[in-house]
Image (spheres, grey):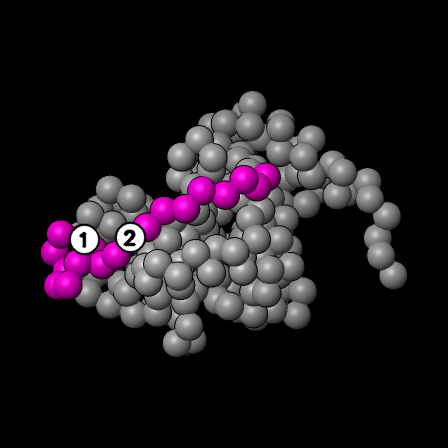
């Protein structure tokens, strides 16, 4: 499974001079918790879309993380979530569905459940939603679904998805499914503090040998 991580956001709202996905939680950047989770779900290849202070992310994670290859798609100017996704999309190699996730959230759903729902309804894109119907920033997409979308500044939700259903022929099928699963967000200082509490149990748990 290939996983695209949209990691171009700034951490200014958190009072940090680092990219938001690099926000430290117990001496470990948030993006590594996110990658650890997707490795547990079967990730075999990461493509990280970077922009703001890209070198900090690239130097910290490197080209291999926990034996999983990591590739980088670099923005030269801010391109929004849709533009960042389109840059990373060019690095995909698998003919199977891929996952795209925001780099400042972690929705700990069961990937096989998500894949089943996506396949069962014959969707081109499935949006994972929380039980309150909020978009959780986690998507599964068919290979080739974005072939007709240009690489330019765009919002994934407002621009890219809109074009897929209004300008493509035939229109792409975008579905949403709710999942009752832990959701971790570091978008605000309050959420950032809650994320520290959430991951503390992982840090405090004894390592398996």
Whether residue 35 is visible here, answered yes or no, is no
Q: Which residue is mark 2?
A: 174
User: Which comes before the other along the chain, label 1 or label 2?
Assistant: 1
Residue plotted at (67% across, 35% down): 198
Marks 1,2: beta carbons within 8 A: yes
Q: Which residue is mark 1?
A: 165
Helix, strand or loop under label 1? helix
Q: CA distance from mark 1 to mark 2?
A: 8 Å
Q: 11 or 55, which is in the foreground?
A: 11
Residue plotted at (53% across, 35% down): 185
The quadrant holding residue 147 is bottom left
Q: Is residue 167 magenta?
A: yes
- How many badges with numbers are in the image? 2
Residue 89 higher or lower than 16, as above or below: below
Q: Is residue 90 magenta?
A: no
Q: 148 or 64, which is in the foreground?
A: 148
Residue 199 picture location, percent across and down: 69, 39
The quadrant holding residue 136 is top left
Residue plotted at (48% across, 67% down): 2
Which contiguous range is marked in magenta? 164-182
Q: Can you name the residue that lies furthest to the top here?
A: 190
Helix, strand or loop under label 2? strand
- Asked if residue 206 lies left or right of residue 97, the reply is right
Residue 36 picture location, percent across and down: 64, 55
Residue 18 picture location, percent across and down: 53, 40
- Asked if residue 66 lies left or right of residue 147, the reply is right
């Amino acid at each position: 499974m290939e996983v695209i991580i949209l990691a171009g956001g700034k951490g200014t709202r958190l009072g940090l001079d680092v990219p938001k996905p690099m926000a430290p939680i117990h001496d470990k950047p948030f993006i590594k918790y996110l990658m650890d989770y997707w490795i547990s779900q079967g990730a075999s290849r990461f493509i990280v879309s970077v922009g703001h202070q890209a070198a900090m992310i690239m130097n910290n994670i490197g080209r291999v993380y926990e034996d999983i290859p990591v590739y980088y798609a670099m923005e030269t100017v801010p391109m929004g979530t849709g533009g960042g996704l389109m840059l990373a999309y060019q690095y995909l190699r698998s003919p199977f569905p891929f996952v795209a996730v925001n780099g400042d959230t972690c929705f700990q759903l069961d990937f096989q459940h998500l894949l089943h729902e996506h396949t069962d309804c014959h969707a081109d894109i499935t949006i994972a939603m929380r039980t309150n119907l909020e978009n959780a920033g986690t998507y599964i997409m068919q290979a080739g679904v974005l072939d007709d979308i240009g690489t330019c500044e765009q919002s994934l939700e407002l621009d890219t998805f809109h074009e897929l259903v209004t300008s493509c022929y035939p229109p792409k099928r975008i579905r949403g499914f709710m999942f009752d699963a832990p959701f971790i967000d570091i978008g605000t200082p309050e959420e950032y503090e809650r994320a520290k509490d959430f991951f503390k149990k992982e840090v405090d748990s004894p390592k398996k040998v």
